[in-house]
Amino acid sequence: ILTNLLSIMLVHSFFLFLIQPKYLNVYLTQIYTVFMFDTFRSSSKLINTFAGHTRAVWNIDYSIFGDCQFICSGSVDETVRVWDVDNNKQIQSFDKHSSGVYCVKFSSYYYHNNHQNIICSSSYDKTIRFWDFKHNKQLQIFNGHTNGVCGIEFSPFNGGRYLCSGSFDNTIRLWDVETSKSLHIFNGHESG
């Protein structure tokens, strides 16, 4: 099992997106593979490479469910993929989006309240979709945005019950994951 000295790196020819959570450094850039590095104070070494996407990977997320570590990835190839870090392999691929997938997030709400392994994804197809990667099925779709959904984020309170989404339609929407309802639309941005 990888320790808290884990880093995940993707290479993108146009931009670099950097997140540094407490235990994980994530570097996002454009390429079709996910690289994992074991990092130490003065050196790093490549641990693994996950290949499978046929076009650029736009977003990744990392989570632990039970004793298993997972990475999910969203790509311009219109797929969401799930990777088992411990066994170094892809375990699921979802292809119901009709356009590129901008953002993917693991749902702690579903795991802690319903014991389900769920990923949420947003796409340029204007939808937000929830996937059960243990049972290989789509659970729900949030519709409402009138343009591509470029970002999603679960609430850090109430166990992740609420989801915010940002779109090229210049709005931010607040959703209740439990009831699948849009609670509020925040307007005011002039350009998505």
Image (cartoon, rainbow, N blue to C red):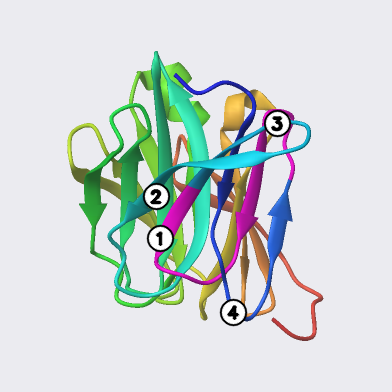
Q: Is residue 7 magenta?
A: no
Is disc 2 surrounded by few (<14), some (14 to 19) or many (20+) residues within 10 Å?
A: some
Q: Which residues are magenta?
A: 20-35
Sequence-first disc among 3 and 2: 3
Q: Position of residue 152 (x, y in %)?
A: 58, 55
Q: CA distance from mark 1 to mark 4?
A: 13 Å
Between 135 and 35, which is closer to the camera in this rendering?
35
Q: Residue at x 28, y 29 (%)?
A: 87
Secondary element type, mark 3: loop
Q: CA distance from mark 3 to mark 1?
A: 22 Å
The residue wearing badge 3 is 40
The residue wearing badge 4 is 13
Sequence-first disc among 3 and 1: 1
Q: Position of residue 61 (x, y in %)?
A: 52, 45
The residue wearing badge 1 is 33
Q: CA distance from mark 2 to mark 4?
A: 18 Å
Q: Is residue 123 above or below residue 119?
A: below
Contact (Cβ within 8 Å) of mark 2 with mark 1 = yes
Secondary element type, mark 4: loop
